[in-house]
Image (cartoon, rainbow, N blue to C red):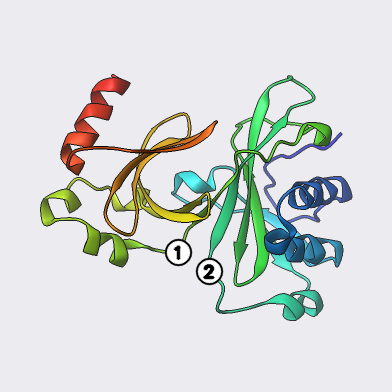
Amino acid sequence: MIDFFRNIFPSRLDNRSCHFLIICLAKMPQETYGLYKEQLEAGIVRFIGNSEVDHPAFKNYVNFTYNPKVSVRFQNMNERFWRVTGIKVKDQKRLEDAVVSIFFSYGLICGYSYDTNREFSPDAATIDVSSVTREFLDSPDTVVRTLLSDDDQRLINWSDVFEVEVNGKEFFHLRDIGDGDFIGIDGDGLIYEIHHDPLEVIGVEGNLGEVFARFSERMN
């Protein structure tokens, strides 16, 4: 049984938690995730600790510090900061679903997070990666501002904006609409309603203010 919990002081990544993350990575396309699986198997993680970051993507974020003899073999300073999210797994203790995210930066696996406030024991046999998405966490503000009018920019909470890859296409997350779904735009400035379970991308008519107003009414 694996217990993920919030650590007050840096500690070692235990073998069972490491094995769980390896299984998650092994279930996803190896052309993207095989290298990160190899990093864990090579012992890249020296310590883990908790980082308090004021961003919804980093809830219960557990960060890694590295074994430098291993990390130097894999580090690529040209790689971006991103996460894969939507990894679903059953909690053995409560038979509830939890969602795990795994983070990457500069070509290295750099941490993970989970969406429950309680300790949980993930059942590796129930790992489901059918609805995962990639989210780029380095700032996309400059690009998004070129796609929006001045009036539309005033509607944006810029801390909510990040880049997401869905079905091989890049979108910019603009506003959550509940249950992990969101309003986003593509590189041409077209607006979409994007659902994560099941994964679905739906074009939306209207300007951004009208779209936000419609979804605000729906959520109330």
**Residue 212: x percent and y percent?**
23, 35
Q: Could you say which disc has been placed on residue 99 in the image?
A: none
Quarter-of-image position of residue 106: bottom right
**Residue 193: x percent and y percent?**
36, 37
The N terminus lies in which quarter of the figure? Answer: top right
Left or right of 77? Residue 210 is left
Quarter-of-image position of residue 182: top left
Q: Label 1, secondary structure: give it.
A: loop
Residue at figure coordinates x 22%, y 35% from the top left: 211
The C terminus lies in which quarter of the figure? Answer: top left
70 versus 28 height, above or below? below
What kind of residue is marked 1?
A: Asp
217 versus 176 height, above or below? above
- The tally of labels here is 2
Query: Given contact means CB atoms under 8 Å apart, are the residues at marks 1 and 2 in contact?
Result: yes
Q: Could you say which disc has been placed on residue 80 in the image?
A: 2
The residue tagged 1 is: 138
Residue at figure coordinates x 50%, y 47% from the top left: 57
Q: Earlier in the sequence, mark 1 or mark 2?
A: 2
35 versus 210 height, above or below? below
87 versus 69 height, above or below? above
**Residue 18: x percent and y percent?**
82, 51
Q: Label 2, secondary structure: give it.
A: loop
